[in-house]
Image: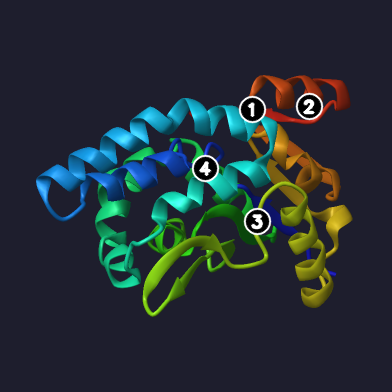
Amino acid sequence: MAAAAFYDLEGTLVSTNLVHTLGFYARNQQGVLRSLRKTATTVLSIPLFAATDQYSRKVFNDLFFKRYKGETEDRLRFFADELFESVLKPAVFPGTFELIEKSRSLGLRQIVVTGALDFSVEPLMKYLGIETYVSNRLEFVNGIATGRLLPPVLAAATKASWIRNHAEQEGINLSESYAYTDSMSDLPMLSIVGHPAAVNPDMRLKQTALHHDWPILNLK
């Protein structure tokens, strides 16, 4: 059976997070006043986003993605390349390409599992040379975002479920596979592979990695 390397994205391979993407779209609103209001609202919401993310990733998703309500799908996709060039590409960690190339040299399939939005991820995946990835998707009605995500909502245990299903469908041996993430919220994803690793970890994940003797990588 084949084996794979499963990566979280934000905080693991790039230094950005979901708020940076939302902030980019807020700054690029049509009209100066609307742009300023949207940017200010986003900045003021950062402490709330951080608190809810620590409490529950599901609550965070429900709160955070409502900020996209009313956005048009065409506009979000139109600015995706500019988002990549100005925000995401400069945020790729120096060690990211080395980790991916080393993983490829071991014959592992490269797979990204991220809670970021699909239109923001696509250009970055092309840049990293990763063909297989799964991401969150906004619900659109008549081309307008409702502020909700389409299922499955990728976060915490849902990422692990997706990995299990994908591995079964593609004949991937999870006991021979690797997983990389920076966040304790992705512990389920690390727990289902034979070779988990903490990358640029938060404090809780670092302590867990030390306890289990998992590798701790710094790509910064």
Task: Identify the residue shown where x is 45% and y is 56%.
Answer: 128
- Residue type for callout 1: Pro
Mark 4 and mark 1 lie on one chain; the one further toward the N terminus is 4
Q: Which mark is residue 209?
A: 2
- Residue type for callout 3: Leu
Mark 4 surroundings within 10 Å by alpha-carbon count, few (fewer than 14), some (14 through 19), many (20 or more): many
Q: What element does badge 3 sit on? A: loop
User: Which residue is disc 1 drawn over?
Assistant: 201
User: Which residue is disc 3 drawn over?
Assistant: 154
Q: Position of residue 41 (x, y in %)?
A: 33, 36
The image's colour scheme reads rainbow
CA–CA distance in space, label 1 to label 3 = 19 Å
The N terminus - image quarter: bottom right
CA–CA distance in space, label 4 to label 2 = 19 Å
Q: Position of residue 163 (x, y in %)?
A: 76, 61
Q: Which mark is residue 91?
A: none
Q: Looking at the rendering, which quadrant does residue 176 occupy? A: bottom right
Task: Identify the residue shown where x is 21% and y is 52%.
Answer: 29
Mark 4 and mark 2 lie on one chain; the one further toward the N terminus is 4
User: Which residue is disc 4 drawn over?
Assistant: 10
Looking at the image, is 56 positioned above or below residue 120?
above
- Residue type for callout 4: Glu
Q: Are marks 1 and 2 in contact (CB under 8 Å)?
A: yes
Q: Relative to 192, is 199 on the left or the right?
A: left
Q: Relative to 65, is 32 on the left or the right?
A: left
Q: What element does badge 1 sit on? A: loop
Viewer-proximal residue among 106 and 214:
214
